[in-house]
Image (cartoon, rainbow, N blue to C red):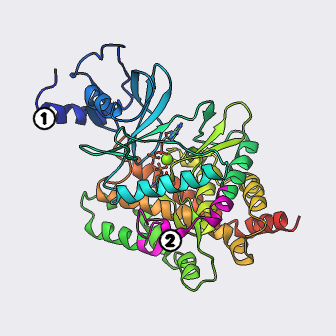
């Protein structure tokens, strides 16, 4: 039995070290076993009863059969809740990352309602019994209906899937074109402001609070030596040569659910960072994650490559979907946007590694460094391929 706080902290630590993130507890129906049972998720142990009590405050159907950690997101703590009737996604939102949860949930409800009204399948927010979109009780919690018969991928095995992802994210941007951007709260300020991210990186490097800089000199040098490449997107937005759109801003492959039967894209998820931004961000972030030969945290760098073929298939989906509204300047800058999102993400992982892993969930001590390395390798290869990438984009546009 885990009774005092110290013991719980100790177990949390062991859990983190031994990487036992996915302890699954099944709950007997109708009697929920006992308050002593704990569920480990992202290095944090929470009592099952505590979670169950929170889940029960939402308008869910049926009796809860199980609650288990779910998915591979780096930010929120996600659980799959199975009841006698239905399945749900239950999330503890990350209040360190998102400082205005109320504003964030207004965005989510606003966007999902807007999409539903247009007949577009979207995530369905389950409200609390008192009519709120989230629960504020020792943290911030929300519930979504689990979208059944779908899969989300960590890596592309079949190129046609990636084309469908590109098409879906392109269409998503079209669908949001009429959404009133003034209704959106900026959930993370300067989210894709790469020069600002670079400043954060330099500050973390200066502080080097865990004395880790000596373990990643090569990566640090890459980020420092590319300083003059970081401002083009923000400059374009500021001088209005790049149009501001309503964008998703976190378009990685596991943030879209694909139909398990047809392979078509079904629902764009993770709407926490929908904000005014540039098309370059959404296109670029998908390429960063999806046009890679390996997963984001592959340790063997020899296996890490940027795939021009995957770039082509994604561009075919995305650019074709956006043909009506893409500007010449945007089209020209899509290859740069891919590089920018990749190097930006690399520098964010490296910043977090230097700062003591405060932002992204990690599974082992140098996880963020491993991630930074793959992004830096990919960014370097993209730089070498700008001309070929541009050729691909314009060949699609001129079809
Ligand atoms: P994070 O911000 O931590 O990435 P997400 O909102 O992306 O959190 O959710 C994490 C994972 O949970 C997703 O990658 C997906 O696998 C799964 N997921 C989220 N919402 C749903 C849903 N409504 N239906 C099915 N799976 C979902
Ligand atoms: C985070 O939430 P998730 O895991 O889908 C991060 C993205 C990064 C990504 C790197 C709010 O995405 O910006 O690109 O990790 N989300 C936030 O994998 O910071
Ligand atoms: Mg996610």
Tell me: residue 25, above or below residue 56: above
Measuring from the top left, give residue 325's x and y in whole percent.
74, 70
Q: Secondary structure at mark 1?
A: helix
Quarter of the image with the C terminus is bottom right
Quick one: which residue is furthest to the bottom in this view? 239
The answer to which of 265 and 313 lies nearer the viewer is 265
User: What separation in Å lies between label 2 and label 1 (alpha carbons)?
Assistant: 45 Å
User: Is 37 left or right of 223, judged from the image as shown?
Assistant: left
The answer to which of 277 and 304 lies nearer the viewer is 277
Q: Secondary structure at mark 2?
A: helix
Tell me: residue 310, above or below residue 88: below
- Ligand 1 within 8 Å, label 1 CB: no
Residue drawn at point x = 60 percent, y = 83 percent: 240
Viewer can see residue 215: no
Residue drawn at point x = 55 percent, y = 63 percent: 341
Measuring from the top left, give residue 345's x and y in whole percent.
49, 60
**Mark in front: 2 vs 1:** 2
Measuring from the top left, give residue 72's x and y in whole percent.
47, 40
User: Which quadrant of the structure image shows residue 262?
Assistant: top right
Magenta span covers which residues? 172-196
Quick one: which residue is furthest to the right in this view? 399
Numbered disc total: 2
Numbered label attached to residue 182: 2
Residue drawn at point x = 23 percent, y = 43 percent: 138
Number of residues whose C-alpha sits closer than 10 Å to that of mark 2, classed few (under 14), some (14–19) or many (20 or more): few
Numbered label attached to residue 5: 1
């Amino acid at each position: 039995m885990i009774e005092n706080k110290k013991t719980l902290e100790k177990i949390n630590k062991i859990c983190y070290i031994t990487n036992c993130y996915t302890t699954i507890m099944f709950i007997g129906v109708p009697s929920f076993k006992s308050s002593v049972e704990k569920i480990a998720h992202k290095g944090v142990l929470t009592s099952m009863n505590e979670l169950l009590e929170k889940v029960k405050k939402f308008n869910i159907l049926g009796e809860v059969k199980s609650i288990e950690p779910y998915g591979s997101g780096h930010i929120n703590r996600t659980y799959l809740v199975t009841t006698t009737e239905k399945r749900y996604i239950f999330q503890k939102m990350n209040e360190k990352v998102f400082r205005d949860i109320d504003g964030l949930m207004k965005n989510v409800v606003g966007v999902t309602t807007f999409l539903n009204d247009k007949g577009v399948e979207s995530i369905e927010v389950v409200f609390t019994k008192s009519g709120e979109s989230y629960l504020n009780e020792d943290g911030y919690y929300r519930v979504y209906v689990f979208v059944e018969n779908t899969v989300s991928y960590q890596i592309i095995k079949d190129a046609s899937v990636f084309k469908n992802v590109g098409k879906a994210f392109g269409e998503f941007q079209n669908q949001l074109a009429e959404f009133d951007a003034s209704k959106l709260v900026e959930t993370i300020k300067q989210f894709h402001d790469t020069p600002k991210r670079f400043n954060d990186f330099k500050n973390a490097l200066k502080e080097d609070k865990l004395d880790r800089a000596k373990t990643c000199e090569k990566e640090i040098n890459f980020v420092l030596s590319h300083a003059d490449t970081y401002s083009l997107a923000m400059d374009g937005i500021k001088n209005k040569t790049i149009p501001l759109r309503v964008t998703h801003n976190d378009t990685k492959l596991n943030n879209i659910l694909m139909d398990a039967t047809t392979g078509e894209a079904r629902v764009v998820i993770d709407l926490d960072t929908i904000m005014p931004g540039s098309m370059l961000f959404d296109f670029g972030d998908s390429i960063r994650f999806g046009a890679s030969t390996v997963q984001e945290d592959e340790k063997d760098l020899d296996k890490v490559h940027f795939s021009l073929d995957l770039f082509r298939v994604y561009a075919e989906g995305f650019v074709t979907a956006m043909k009506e509204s893409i500007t010449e300047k945007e089209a020209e800058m899509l290859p740069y946007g891919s590089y920018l999102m990749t190097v930006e993400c690399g520098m964010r992982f490296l910043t977090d590694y230097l700062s003591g892993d405060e932002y992204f969930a990690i599974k082992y001590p140098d996880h963020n460094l491993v991630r930074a390395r793959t992004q830096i390798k990919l960014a370097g290869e993209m730089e070498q391929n700008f001309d070929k990438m541009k050729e691909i984009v314009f060949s699609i546009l001129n079809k």
